[in-house]
Image: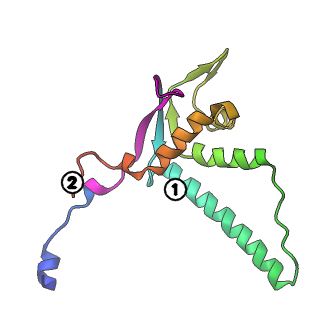
Amino acid sequence: MTTSETTAAVVDLTDFLPQDTAVIEVLAPGGRQIGWFVTLAGPAHPKTIAASDAAARKALHRSKLIEQAQVNGKKYVADERSPEETRRENVQGVVARIVDWTPIKIGPETFAFSDTKAVDLLVRPDMGWAYVQIAEAQADDTRFTKASAKA
């Protein structure tokens, strides 16, 4: 194909761009449908971009501290973190890409979606089954691709 033929051809990539959101149903342990729907932010959603930018800023700051310590001939000492802090940080990363969910009830408490409520719920060890499903769905980019996209 010549340059002029390549330039004249137009390839429409619109159907291959990710959707802003995708909805999943969180299943009960064992796979039973329970009606809990979670709306996830896609790769280009403002919530995803903000979470990505925050993680990058944190990594850059840590890199800067390490470099400054090396330049000054000092030893870099990383902050000591507990397993609870690490778990909470991981959950916060997943929650940062949740847009909304169907309100749920556990005992007397109702959990309408908010970032704070979501972290408090999903950090609980007994809610690991839900956390894993949401995290895996976020990692599956095909969930955010339009069904009509054809190769």
Q: Is residue 47 above or below residue 100?
A: below
* Disc 1, SS: helix
Q: Earlier in the sequence, mark 2 or mark 1?
A: 1
Report the magenta residues as a range.
Answer: 15-35
Give residue 118's position: percent from left, percent from top. Answer: 62, 35
* Residue at x-position 47% and y-position 28%: 31
On the rendered structure, is 74 left or right of 109?
Answer: right
Residue at 73% across, 50% down: 86
- Residue at image coords 36%, 52%: 18
Question: Residue 53 placed where, x, y %?
Answer: 58, 60
* Residue that lies at the very extreme toward the front in this rendered image: 30
For the residue marked with disc 1, what is the amino acid? Ile
Looking at the image, the residue that sits furthest to the right is 74
Q: In this rendering, which labeled residue sits more in front, label 2 or label 1? A: 2
In this rendering, the answer to whether 146 lies above or below 24 is below
Label 2: state its secondary structure.
Answer: loop
Which residue corresponds to mark 2? Answer: 150
The quadrant holding residue 107 is: top right
Residue matched to label 1: 49
Q: Position of residue 124 (x, y in %)?
A: 69, 34
- Above or below residue 117? Residue 91 is below
In terms of image quadrants, where is residue 135? top right
Amino acid at dot 2: Lys
| Badge 2 density bin: few <14, some 14–19, many ≥20, Cα 10 Å | few
Judged left or right of residue 54, residue 32 is left
